[in-house]
Image (cartoon, rainbow, N blue to C red):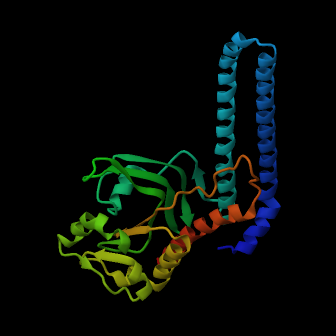
Amino acid sequence: MQELQEFRRYYNNHLHADLQAFERQRWALIISIGLAILTGLGLVLAVLAFELFPIIFLLILPYWFIYNFFLRWIDRFKSRFKPLVVQSILQFIDPRLRYYHKDFIPKDSFNRAHIFPFNPHIYSGEDYIMGKIGEVYFEMCELKVMHTSDVTDRLETWLNGVFFHTKFNFRAEGQMVIIPRVQAQKFIRTFKRLTRYGGYELKDTGNPRFDEDFLVYIDRKMKYEDILTPDLLNTLNSYHERSGQEIYASFMGSHFYLAVAEPYELLDAHLFSTNVDFELISAYYEELFVFTQLVEDFDLRH
């Protein structure tokens, strides 16, 4: 996997020119909005100066159309930014990877992870990425998952972040779930699903730092020593500490699922500040890099 310095060179040689073109579109939009506001104010002041008050009501309809025109323009402007950046980053990581802005992982796949203790009432997403690293297939997307609380009978957001799935090529049996300790109370039904049939809490993974932050429950078929390698535990722990976000994971046979409660607002385009910002782009690259590291780890073990 390429290092950040190599990505900086790629950014300078390829992505920077595209962002500069995007910046010109931003300025065109800002200038157009400014001219429209000045024109509108000028008309209002003229009406007030000449006391043509009935005309004000005639201006409401064209102002409403102009307002909605700019809202749609802003929405189109912002919606083009993320696909531009993500496709460029994936081209750098591996040209075989594919990106679909409006697609997301099917709900059935999410439920097969058996991390969250329900079939969500609201399930939506976007920014679907899929492909292979080496010989291992993976997919990921942004998801928003909501479910009605049994206590308050109101919708609660359980996940607003990234959902990741990979199928590694070596044979594994059994099930395992990994939940942040601070979220233990909310996931009692997830734990009971395993303990009901002889599963148990794994209290010592060999990584004290990991054990301090996470609860691990497994069934008796799972040979966790083959799965929870030091590299995997360190990757999950480091990502958790660096991002400050909650991480949930499961192993279902040869399938690995990961949910990160981190809204991907890193690549939301700015209107009144520049988007030609390496730190902004590299932050997203580093997020993707963590997931490709996980896939590479499984690929090396097949």
Above or below for 105 versus 62: below
Asked whether the viewer can see residue 255, the reply is no
Q: Examine the image and state in which quarter residue 284 appears.
A: bottom right
Identify the residue shown where x is 67% and y is 60%: 89
Above or below for 289 versus 27: below
- Is residue 64 toward the left or the right of residue 113 in the image? right
Asked whether the viewer can see residue 132, the reply is yes
Which residue is nearer to you in this view: 142 or 167? 142
Q: Examine the image and state in which quarter residue 176 appears.
A: bottom left
Residue 129 pos. (x, y %): 55, 56
Identify the residue shown where x is 25% and y is 52%: 150
Residue 101 pos. (x, y %): 58, 47
- Is residue 221 toward the left or the right of residue 16 in the image? left
Identify the residue shown where x is 28% and y is 75%: 218
User: Which quarter of the rendered picture does the N terminus lie within?
Assistant: bottom right
- Is residue 110 toward the left or the right of residue 240 in the image? left
Residue 7 pos. (x, y %): 73, 68
Above or below for 67 versus 285: above
